[in-house]
Amino acid sequence: MGGLLGVAVLGAGHMGADHIRRLDRVTGGARVAAVADPDLARAEAAVAGIDGASSHAEVAAALDAPGVEAVLIASPGPAHEAALHEAFARGLPVLCEKPLVPDAEGALRVVEAEVRFGRRLVQVGFMRRYDAEYLRLKSLLDEGALGRPLMLHCVHRNVSSPPGFTSAMLVDSSVSHEIDAARWLLGQEPVAVSVLRPGSTGRAPEGLLDPQFVLLETDGGVLVDVEIFVNTGFGYQVRCEAVCEGGSARIGEEHGMTVTAPGRESREVPQDYLVRFADAYDRELRAWVEACRAGRVTGPSAWDGYASSATAEAGVRAQRTGTRTPVDLAPRPALYA
Ligand SMILES: NC(=O)C1=CN([C@@H]2O[C@H](COP(=O)(O)OP(=O)(O)OC[C@H]3O[C@@H](n4cnc5c(N)ncnc54)[C@H](O)[C@@H]3O)[C@@H](O)[C@H]2O)C=CC1
Ligand SMILES: O=C1[C@@H](O)[C@H](O)[C@@H](O)[C@H](O)[C@H]1O
């Protein structure tokens, strides 16, 4: 492909608007061809100043707009499945924000549709796989210098949850990142999930179970614990420590500037993912655009999206029943071997 990759972006909210800016000004090799949002004013505002980009209230109209060769889905999770099938019907490659589809059945339908299509079309937006610190941790574990991993201790904190955020979403939206990161770092699949929780913070909206403590068990015998706390009020913190037979490695503690003033030292705390993971999103989109232009699809697959959603669904059941819940993954199709 010689020219710029024409991308239709579905959803022009928080994430969609940031990806539109990135495609337009950072990524290179791509251009925003169309934007769809049922809130048409939002789609219009998102394309303002972008030459040749059209705005639409309907997904189909954006996908059929002139020059569209690829799709970036940044609508809310429950809208992803329909959009993915629409993209498949047109043979368009897709970067789909996480979660692929929040429920396991819907995610599996997407996997099956891609298998019927016969080749990969989907990259899922698990951007931590493109973060410099996560990449270093992955290399270290792969080299085996620290020996066999035994435990991952993870922390995932947000300043506040957006309107409409539910107790299930702490697991199937937020912890979906740790589930994917653990599968990727360890090369192992989760087999069971348990969820415990302390009393909720007074900062959380009425009825929201926040924080929660999620424990994954893997088929390689590793325990992965995740503190998910989405109304801390103080900062965006994502940490991961791998404890292995021969040592441990920790990422996620040094972000922002450290200021030393007379008698004290202080460090900035990022306030959201757009700051903490800015470089990772840039790298993620560059990799996607380059692959699309070369006629390939790389990165986290629809199968990874399904595995994360199936694990999260077991986690939501564990949260509701208070019991350890097995994760039953469907057989992995050869397309994702
Ligand atoms: N990778 C990451 O770190 C992050 C990923 N996300 C993911 O990005 C997606 C969007 O999240 P936000 O931007 O935070 O939500 P948002 O609520 O800020 O924006 C969603 C936008 O999609 C529009 N929309 C609703 N239904 C639609 C449909 N059927 N087709 C097209 N647009 C539709 C809404 O009008 C809204 O403008 C979600 O899947 C979320 O999980 C969100 C934050 C961070
Ligand atoms: O994906 C994300 C959001 O959807 C989710 O709500 C946040 O908890 C995560 O930190 C962010 O990365």
Image (spheres, rainbow, N blue to C red):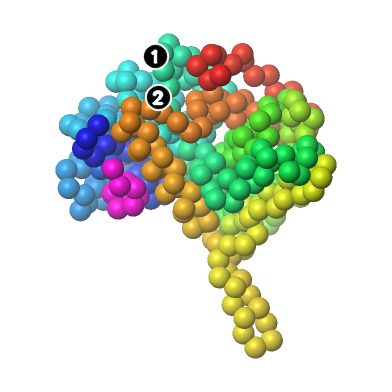
Instruction: Let me know if residue 172 appears in the view.
Output: yes
From what the image shows, is residue 46 above or below residue 63?
Answer: below
Which residue is pictured at 65% across the width and 59% down the height?
253
Which residue is pictured at 76% across the width and 31% down the height?
217
- Asked whether, in this view, residue 323 is left or right of residue 55, the answer is right
Question: Of 160 and 2, which appears nearest the observer?
Answer: 2
Residue 106, percent from left and from top: 51, 21
Quarter of the picture containing the C terminus is top right
Q: Quadrant of ligand 1?
A: top left
Which residue is disc 1 drawn over?
117
| Mark 1 crowd level (few <14, some 14–19, many ≥20, 10 Å Cα) | few
- Mark 1–mark 2 Cα distance, whole angstroms, equals 9 Å
Residue 176, percent from left and from top: 59, 37
| Mark 2 crowd level (few <14, some 14–19, many ≥20, 10 Å Cα) | many
Which residue is pictured at 65% across the width and 88% down the height?
262
From what the image shows, is residue 314 above or below residue 161?
Answer: above
Which residue is disc 2 drawn over?
121
Query: What segment carries the magenta color?
Result: 21-29
Which residue is pictured at 32% across the width and 20% down the height?
91
Q: How many marks?
A: 2
Q: Are marks 1 and 2 in contact (CB under 8 Å)?
A: yes
- Asked whether, in this view, residue 128 is left or right of residue 23, the answer is right
Where residue 188 sits, quadrant-wise, is: top right
Quarter of the picture containing the N terminus is top left
Predominant secondary structure in magenta?
helix
